[in-house]
Amino acid sequence: MSPEAAGFVEQDASSLRTDAVGDAIADYGLLGAKIESLARLRQLQGVRAEIAMLSMGRSYVRRCVGRNGSWTSGIHLLWWTRLRLDQEPEVNAGDIRMELAIPLARQVEMAQWAVLMFRLVFISDIGQYAKVSGSRAGVGGLSSLAEEAAAETSDVTPKALITWLKRKGLSRFDHALPERSYVRMARDLHRDAEDGD
């Protein structure tokens, strides 16, 4: 059954165009390259945009890997996630879509923790792809980053996770993919993509 037949793809995206996040999602695949929509989401403020970028980014990278495609966009998505890795997600009461029988402040904390873990899961996914493919050897070392963070932080709070990221997570990332390596890799991948045209 096709995604359209299963109801996963909305044929009329006009209702999505009422806000910036929905507009970027509606354009996914319609612009010159899918990475353009992901780059637009990166520029938008708020956790809705970040969750959309990470979610669509995971699907995008998985699809590229499944087709033996280039890592160019995946490396950019990885680096963009690193740039905000230890920043506290800005979750507002309006971002909470479901009422729970706990104080709103705790719901916000739990949502922040979930976004922080989503960043780590995205990084671990790309690390696993790199590890399995044998390419980008350093990036493969990030495959267990989310598991380590969860194991070493017993509190389900953004504060505990941000503390771990500042103490261990960022240095692990920077050891696996220093900025100079990212810049060199992105340049090489871009050149390879141009040569393949």
Image: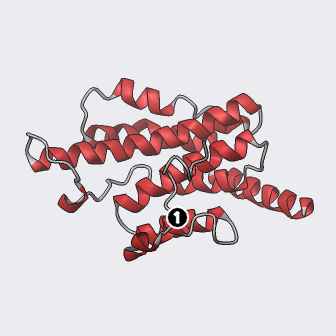
Q: Residue at x 21, y 62 (%)?
A: 94
**Quick one: 134 or 50, which is closer to the camera?**
50
The vertical placement of 165 against 25, above or below, is: above
- Residue 174: quarter of image: top right
Q: Residue at x 32, y 55 (%)?
A: 89
Residue type at tag 1: Gln
In this figure, which residue is indicated by the disc labeled 1?
A: 11
Coordinates of residue 4 in the picture (x, y in percent) = 56, 53
The vertical placement of 151 against 3, above or below, is: above
Coordinates of residue 111 in the picture (x, y in percent) = 27, 46
Q: Which residue is at the far top?
A: 151
Coordinates of residue 165 in the picture (x, y in percent) = 40, 41
**Quick one: 94 or 72, which is closer to the camera?**
94
Q: Is 22 positioned to the left or the right of 141 in the image?
A: left
- Residue 39: quarter of image: bottom right
Coordinates of residue 194 in the picture (x, y in percent) = 86, 64
Q: Which residue is drawn at 40% across and 31% down?
A: 149
Q: Residue at x 32, y 53 (%)?
A: 88
